[in-house]
Amino acid sequence: MLRDARQWSNARCCHRLGTGSEDDTWTTEPTSRARLDPQPFIYAAIVVFGLALFWLSEPSRAAGQTLEQYGGWQVIAYMLLYTLPTIVAVTAAGLLVFESFHGAASPVLKVGTMAIALACLFSLADAITRVDNAMFVAGHHVYFLTDYRPSGGSESDSSSR
């Protein structure tokens, strides 16, 4: 989840680089009121999510199983909480990259923003398939991702399901 906080910071830098703006408000409108720094709130959310993930994985740890092997509603809730920061951060970064692409004057910046957008799409697809996989695992349905993901990418034995 700290990776997601880093993605927010990287998105800010990319936005400033692409638009040439030194302003850190992420908007083009001038504001007269003071802005709160979102970083403490992001870290507080990370702590809350981490504690929730610890609580959700408790039954599977007590049973000596992985969360995918244990199944149940906990695996869906766990993956939703686990991937939510990634989905939000990658979507925000993708929107900023889209804005930066249209404001970029240099072809090099355009290629760079396209590469970042592609990385955002891959991260978003990974996060969505994690939730999709969790739903199938909780329902005890087997398809190629339920065999692939829990084993870390290698072939697994699905005969016990």
Image (cartoon, rainbow, N blue to C red):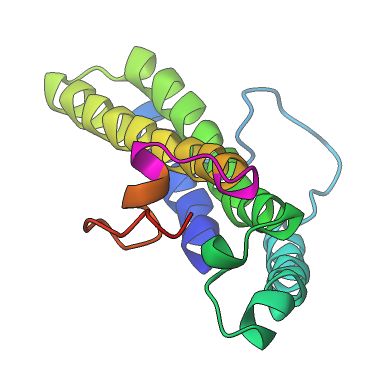
Which of 92/133 is in front? 133
Q: In which quarter of the image is residue 75?
A: bottom right
Which of 82/46 is in front? 82
Q: Quadrant of residue 42?
A: bottom right
**Magenta stretch containing residue 143, yes or no?**
yes
Residue 62 coordinates in the image, percent (x, y): 68, 87
Left or right: residue 77 compared with residue 23: right
Can you say whether 48 is above or below 120 in the image? below
User: Residue at image x 65%, y 76%?
Assistant: 60
In this view, the residue farthest toward the left is 108
User: Residue at image x 40%, y 28%?
Assistant: 97
In this view, the residue farthest toward the top is 102
Which of 102/4 is in front? 4
User: Residue at image x 46%, y 52%?
Assistant: 7
Residue 25 coordinates in the image, percent (x, y): 64, 39
Position of the N terminus, as image quadrant, is bottom right
Left or right: residue 152 compared with residue 146: left
Left or right: residue 130 compared with residue 27: left
**Magenta stretch containing residue 94, yes or no?**
no
Can you say whether 120 is above or below 60 in the image? above
**Magenta span covers which residues?**
137-145
Q: In which quarter of the image is residue 28?
A: top right
Residue 110 seen by the camera: yes
Left or right: residue 89 compared with residue 109: right
Residue 52 coordinates in the image, percent (x, y): 77, 69
Which of 114/81 is in front? 81
In this view, the residue farthest toward the right is 33
Residue 107 coordinates in the image, percent (x, y): 14, 19
In this view, the residue farthest toward the front is 159
